[in-house]
Image (cartoon, grey):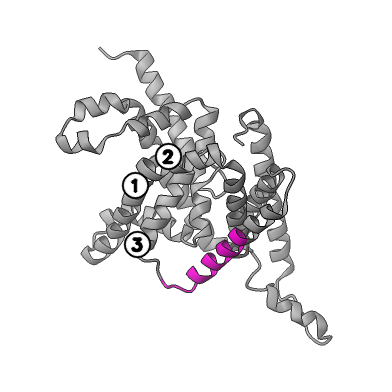
Amino acid sequence: MNNPKSKKNKISIYLIGITMGSVDVIPGISGGTIAFITGIYHDLIKSIDRFSFKKLLKGQFRILWEDVNGSFLLSLFLGIITGVFFLSGILIYLFRYHPISISAFLFGIIFAVFLKFIGLIKNKKVGDYIYLLVSLTVSISITQLNSFSVEPSLIYLFFCSVIAVSAMILPGVSGAMIFLIFGIYNEILLVIQNSVRILFNFNMEDFIIIYSKVISISLGIILGLKVFSRFVIWLFNYEKRKTLLILTGLVGGSLPKLWPLKDCLNLDTINYLFKSNRDFITCKTNEIAESVFFILAGLLLILVLNRFKKAVEYF
């Protein structure tokens, strides 16, 4: 006989999963924070930690299911997958038809997170600025180098997925932001959507290309969850300051990539200021107004979220 309370609990976990999946797609917002706020964070970490590949390979499925609290994980991950697929479709549409608006909105989010992290570092010393400058330089270099490649390799997707999922389980750290820093955010969104679309419009060549990426990303996620997540949590427990400094630099370095007016207002236009017969801004007035509005909207979103979760400050 089904327990109504148990069924209700599974539904609530599923809904939490949908929320986590939705926010994990947005750079700067952490699904780990949602898990923390809703009180399931420690259960999630404990379940991941108890997962055993040895028992899986031995076929001890029932024991493994009980060890990891299988019904909890299944309900949660089904919700996360639902949220990810739902919001990724919306974001792909926005990037395609409203690139300035969505870039400006994400720029505002990332800038707000950058300012927040800067504010968390108290009593800054010379050594702190070195960590910050090095990580900022590395982040800018990575995003710029990757922008020249036609398509990221499977190894690169795997590597980024390991790092992103390790960060994703921490409250206050966004996995999508890590993908953005490494320049593959749009690619991840497309892979998510195309992995379903190809099943309804089947083509063997495209299927192999898309699902080789899915497998590469999935393996990175599995490895990151099981192995590197412990290391990342250890860093935040014992090397908080240095980790936060490096993370702050990585976040700040992703901002140039998101600058919404880069096609009509960029660093090259500064040279025009010294030439009296040339206009240094080629943006339309409505594009500038649109960018300012959505940058402020992104900043406001993080401000509202910070007020909402003030009692759950991680650092």
Looking at the picture, does residue 256 appear above or below residue 62? below
From the image, tell me which residue sits under label 3.
155
Look at the image and give the residue range highlighted in magenta: 134-150
Residue 78: where, in percent of width, then height?
36, 36
What's under tag 2, amino acid-wise?
Answer: Arg
Q: CA distance from mark 3 to mark 1?
A: 13 Å
Looking at the picture, does residue 263 appear above or below residue 246? below
Residue 257: where, in percent of width, then height?
58, 64
Residue 116: where, in percent of width, then height?
68, 45
Looking at the picture, does residue 2 appear above or below residue 195? above
Kindly check if marks 2 and 1 are in contact, taking CB atoms under 8 A apart as contact: no
Q: CA distance from mark 2 to mark 1?
A: 11 Å
Q: Nearer the viewer, mark 2 or mark 1?
A: 2
Q: Is residue 136 magenta?
A: yes
Callout 3 secondary element: helix
Q: Main secondary structure of the magenta part?
A: helix
Does residue 98 appear to the left or right of 271 in the view shown? left
Quadrant of the rendering where the C terminus is positioned: top right
- Residue at the extreme right: 276
Q: Nearer the viewer, mark 3 or mark 2?
A: 2
Q: CA distance from mark 3 to mark 2?
A: 22 Å
Near mark 1 (Cα within 10 A), the count class, few <14, some 14-19 or many ≥20, is some
Does residue 107 appear to the left or right of 194 in the view shown? right
From the image, tell me which residue sits under label 2.
230
Does residue 86 appear to the left or right of 73 in the view shown? right
What's under tag 3, amino acid-wise?
Answer: Ile
Q: Is residue 188 magenta?
A: no
From the image, tell me which residue sits under label 1.
223
